[in-house]
Image (cartoon, helix red, strand yellow):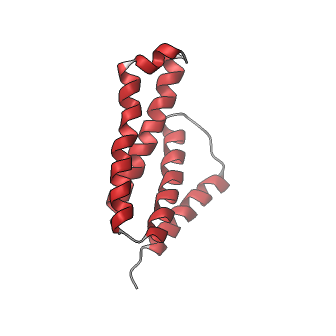
Amino acid sequence: MNVLLLFIVQATYSLSDLGKKVYVEKIGWDWALLKSLPFIVIMAVPFFALALQVYVLSRYELSKTMITLGVLNIAFATGLGVMVLKEKLTTLNYVGVVCAVLAVVLLNIKQ
């Protein structure tokens, strides 16, 4: 399984979600938002990630790939929340993220 490709897929999804959240908070929700070029670009980015995801899912073992994508989602969402949105995590939250990342490492070790 190409973990780097999965990393790119999930990073694209997470950064797009963050972009939508930040842009909508900055501008505010309005129907005109749907016509603004930055918002259209932000909404188009996940289509690139979807194409990559379909490619990955067609090439690699589904059970490991889906688990890896799920854990990368946890890691990216948590990391972006802490770094960009200044969210606070408890020690237990950090332990959970480390355990999730460790799960992906263990899952991808070749036997």
Residue shown at 39% from the left, 18% from the top: 36
The image position of residue 16, as x and y in percent, is: 42, 37
Give x and y (percent) for residue 84.
49, 35
**In this rendering, would 36 be left or right of 106?**
left
Vertical order, 58 against 49 (above or below): below
Quadrant housing residue 62: bottom left
* 39 w.r.t. 8: above or below: above
Which quarter of the image is occupied by the C terminus? bottom left
Q: How many numbered discs, if any?
A: 0
Q: Is residue 56 above or below residue 27?
A: below
Left or right of 43 in this view: 74 = right
Residue 63 pos. (x, y %): 49, 70
Query: Between residues 49 and 11, which one lies in front from this camera angle?
Result: 49
- Name the residue rendered at 47%, 58% in the picture: 69
Q: Where does the image place residue 2, in percent across and percent down from the top left?
A: 33, 65
For the point 39% across and 31% down, the residue is 42
Q: Residue at x 42, y 39 (%)?
A: 15
Viewer-side residue, 18 vs 94: 18
Is 50 left, or right, of 72 in this rendering? left
Quadrant position of the N terminus in the picture:
bottom left
Horizontally, is 111 left or right of 103 in the view? left
Q: Residue furthest bottom?
A: 111
